């Protein structure tokens, strides 16, 4: 259980579908274990609004885990809106980011630890998180302070792609999980690598043998 929480806390990791599949066979009869497994599902496929929607099913998130969920939500937002301009209002309506930042501030202020982000208001805190994700080469965005919006250039890190044949959802519903181009491309690339490219290689090998045999027969 501790290992799973450490994995969720890992600030270099943003994909968890392999952990979801690993724990699918584990015993969910212990309430806290079930809540932890549900939280892994949230981190793999969900965003902050899903945490609010199904909160009784998840473990309580401390400031580190909450910050991680905020970053995961931002990744989802960027991958779903590449090439688009997103206003602050859109960020709250579609991704609950303003509420998430306010929630983080409340949790962080309830501790006596030195905080990673210390700013006078939630807007500056969101900007700080966005800049940190740019510095970590997770996203490429342009922030417009005047229009209070961002333009998404590129999301370099994709969220997990849900496949009903691989994973049985415990809390989230299929309609909760966005169908975005990034995850679709990732699934398509995986399918091509596993199915089409081997067939192309085999075809090329067989064609070469066929041509060599024809040349030998002609001689």
Image (cartoon, rainbow, N blue to C red):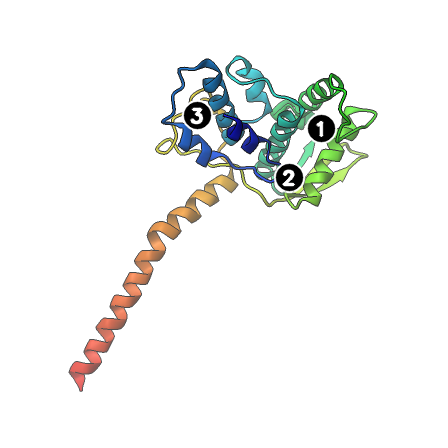
Task: Please tell me which residue lies in front, 181 or 205.
Answer: 205
Q: Residue, x 41% and y 32% (percent of image)?
A: 22
Q: Residue, x 18% and y 87% (percent of image)?
A: 219
Tell me the mark number nearer the camera, choosing from 1 and 3: 3
- Secondary structure at badge 1 equals helix
Q: CA distance from mark 3 to mark 2?
A: 25 Å
User: Badge 3: few (under 14), some or many (20 or more) residues near its Cα, within 10 Å?
Assistant: few
- Secondary structure at badge 2 equals loop
Mark 2, residue position: 84
User: Badge 1: few (under 14), some or many (20 or more) residues near its Cα, within 10 Å?
Assistant: some
Mark 1 vs mark 3: which is more N-terminal? 1
Q: Which mark is residue 26?
A: none
Q: Work out whether 100 lies above or below 201.
A: above
Q: x and y percent of residue 55 in the render?
A: 55, 15
- Secondary structure at badge 3 equals helix
Q: Residue, x 75% and y 34% (percent of image)?
A: 127
In the picture, residue 59 is in which quadrant? top right
Tell me the mark number nearer the camera, choosing from 3 and 2: 3
User: Badge 2: few (under 14), some or many (20 or more) residues near its Cα, within 10 Å?
Assistant: few
Task: Please tell me which residue lies in front, 214 or 43.
Answer: 43
Mark 3, residue position: 174
Circles 1 and 3: CB atoms closer than 8 Å: no
Query: Which residue is most to the left?
Result: 217
Query: Which residue is most to the front?
Result: 2
Tell me the mark number nearer the camera, choosing from 2 and 1: 1
Task: Please tell me which residue lies in front, 49 or 86.
Answer: 49
In the picture, residue 18 is in which quadrant? top left
Mark 3 vs mark 2: which is more N-terminal? 2
Q: CA distance from mark 1 to mark 3?
A: 27 Å
Mark 1, residue position: 88
Q: CA distance from mark 2 to mark 1?
A: 13 Å
């Amino acid at each position: 259980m501790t290992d799973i929480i450490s994995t969720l806390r890992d600030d270099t990791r943003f994909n968890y579908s392999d952990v979801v599949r690993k724990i699918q066979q584990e015993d969910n009869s212990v309430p806290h274990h079930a809540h932890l497994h549900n939280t892994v599902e949230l981190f793999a496929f969900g965003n902050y609004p899903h945490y609010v929607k199904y909160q009784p099913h998840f473990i309580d998130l401390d400031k580190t885990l909450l910050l991680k969920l905020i970053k995961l939500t931002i990744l989802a937002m960027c991958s779903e809106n590449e090439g688009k301009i997103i206003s602050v209002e859109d960020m709250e309506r579609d991704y609950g980011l303003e509420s998430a930042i306010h929630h983080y501030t409340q949790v962080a202020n309830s501790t006596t630890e030195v905080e990673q982000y210390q700013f006078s208001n939630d807007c500056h805190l969101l900007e700080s998180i966005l800049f940190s994700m740019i510095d970590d080469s997770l996203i490429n965005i342009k922030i417009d302070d005047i229009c209070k919006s961002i333009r998404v250039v590129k999301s370099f890190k994709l969220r997990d792609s849900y496949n009903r044949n691989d994973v049985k959802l415990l809390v989230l519903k299929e309609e909760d999980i966005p169908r975005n181009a990034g995850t679709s491309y990732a699934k398509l690339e995986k399918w091509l690598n596993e199915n089409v490219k081997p067939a192309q290689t085999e075809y090329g090998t067989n064609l070469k043998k066929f041509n060599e045999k024809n040349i030998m027969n002609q001689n």
